[in-house]
Amino acid sequence: MPEYLNVVLLSLFAGAAMPAGALLARLDLLHPAFLTRQARQFIVAFGGGALISAVALVLVPEGAKKLSVLPAVLCFACGGIVFYFLDSALSKLKSSAGQLAAMLSDFIPEAIALGAAFAVGESTGLILALLMVLQNLPEGFNAYEELVDSANLSGNKVLGAFFCLAIVGPLCALTGYFLLADAHEFVAGIMLFAGAGILYLVFQDVAPESKAVNGGIPALGAVAGFLLGLVGNMVLAPT
């Protein structure tokens, strides 16, 4: 089997975890006794933990090792700022797309990185695919319930959209495989930008004790704190 077909299948499998999580959420909404309150809270927390793991274990390390300090700082800082304004705009529009944005903000760059990793023969491709599955399942669950509960969308429309989103994975992975395999710095910048966005969304939309009712400055502070740690690690870590 050609290697690019492996890339397509792995990314499609990872993307299919999103509608799989949405189906579980649909079952939970139709049968409220299916999951306990603690089980729902666990799924939400698991999704937040999976997002943080994507930032700490994949997006930031892989991005930082291919960029010097200043470009890395700029990409990460821009990601936090852009997602701050995006979140503010969604709040003014009374949109509940925070979980959806969080889900896509790690899925897209990771799918690109998966394709690029296979193209250059790195061993991180399979690890990325597994991590994407573990993230997308709870994220699909959280995003489906959030959108159906507060966005005035029918369950069938949301579920159909999630199946369409699963196709984004192979498209991004093939882009990484054929077009961006040699654009190491560009892919690294995307990963750091997305990592900051994910970190912002986790603290603003997932971590309840850090969320401000009328603003996202505390969540932006989390991005700044992580950025300080990133700078320290890049400056002080042995090369």
Image: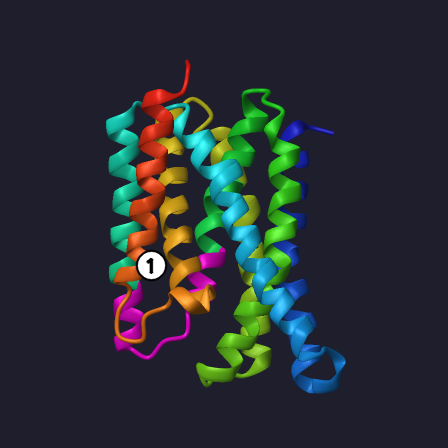
Depicted 157 relative to depicted 172: above or below: below
What kind of residue is marked 1? Answer: Ala
Locate residue 121 relative to residue 220 in the image: left or right.
right
- Where residue 122 sits: x, y (%)? 58, 22
Q: Residue at x 54, y 74 (%)?
A: 158
Q: Which residue is mark 1?
A: 219
Which of the 4 quarters of the picture holds residue 166? bottom right
Depicted 3 relative to depicted 33: above or below: above
Quadrant position of the C terminus in the picture: top left
- Where residue 200 sits: x, y (%)? 36, 55
Stretch in magenta: 87-103
Locate residue 101 relative to residue 162 in the image: left or right.
left
Query: Which element is circle 1 on?
Result: helix
Q: Residue at x 56, y 76 (%)?
A: 145
Q: Residue at x 61, y 59 (%)?
A: 46
Quadrant position of the N terminus in the picture: top right
Callout count = 1
Asked whether 94 falls inside the magenta stretch, the response is yes
Q: Residue at x 66, y 79 (%)?
A: 37
How many neighbours does mark 1 have within 10 angstroms: few (below 14), some (14-19), or many (20 or more)? many
- Where residue 14 sits: x, y (%)? 64, 49
Depicted 230 relative to depicted 184: above or below: below
